[in-house]
Image (cartoon, rainbow, N blue to C red):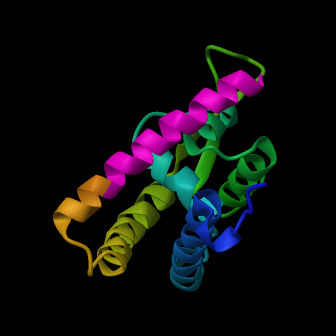
Amino acid sequence: MSTLHLDGFLPYRLSIASNRVSNVIATAYQAMFGLKIPEWRLVAVLAEGEGMSQQALGVMTRMDKVTVSRAAIGLVERGLVKREPNPHDQRSHLLRLTRSGEELYEQVAPKALELERRIFAEFEEKEIGQLRSMLERLEDAAAGFEVEAT
């Protein structure tokens, strides 16, 4: 019988590393901008393009409906995001950054890039590229299991 040693179990190690990095970032965003990680993810995705429905944001950020909804409500209440009717689906709304949301993004994005730089300061560019490539492959492999489970 195989024995599972949690410290050597790669999904566990990946989760621990992800949680540690997320906690560093979450603490910084909360302290500097009053943003929670789900809120920042919505702001970042909305800054990259056109208005999106909450459903599309959930797919794009890989967050569940409740998390997206709570983050969107918080951002709307703060005047960072506005809801507009969706011309393609009257049952949903499109979310867009307000001018205040755009200004916040312009403040947060450089800080996010600086945090990323600091976290990966001890890594060589080649290693970072390898990590990116491996993460993409890992996500693709996991996506195959999601299809099987449905």
- Quarter location, residue 23: bottom right
Residue placed at 31% from the left, 76% from the top?
114
Residue sitting farthest toward the bottom: 31
**Is there any visible trace of residue 140 in the rendered image?**
yes
- Toward the front, the furthest residue is 1
Which residue is at the front of the view, 13 or 70?
Answer: 13
Residue 125 is situated, as x and y percent measured from the top left of the image, at 18, 64
Q: Which of the two residues, 29 or 76, is positioned nearer the viewer here?
A: 29
| Residue 54 placement, left or right of 115 | right
Q: How many marks?
A: 0
Q: Is residue 80 above or below residue 118?
A: above
The percent coordinates of residue 51 (x first, y second) are 52, 34
Prevailing SS of the magenta stretch: helix
Left or right of 59: which side holds 130? left
Percent from the top left, x then y, of residue 80?
Answer: 57, 58
Looking at the image, which residue is at 32% across and 75% down? 120
Question: Is residue 51 shown in magenta?
Answer: no
Instruction: From the top left corner, tell me how far across and down residue 57 is, in percent.
Output: 61, 39
Give, as a single range, the part of the protein colored magenta.
131-150
In the displayed orientation, state which residue is furthest to the left: 125
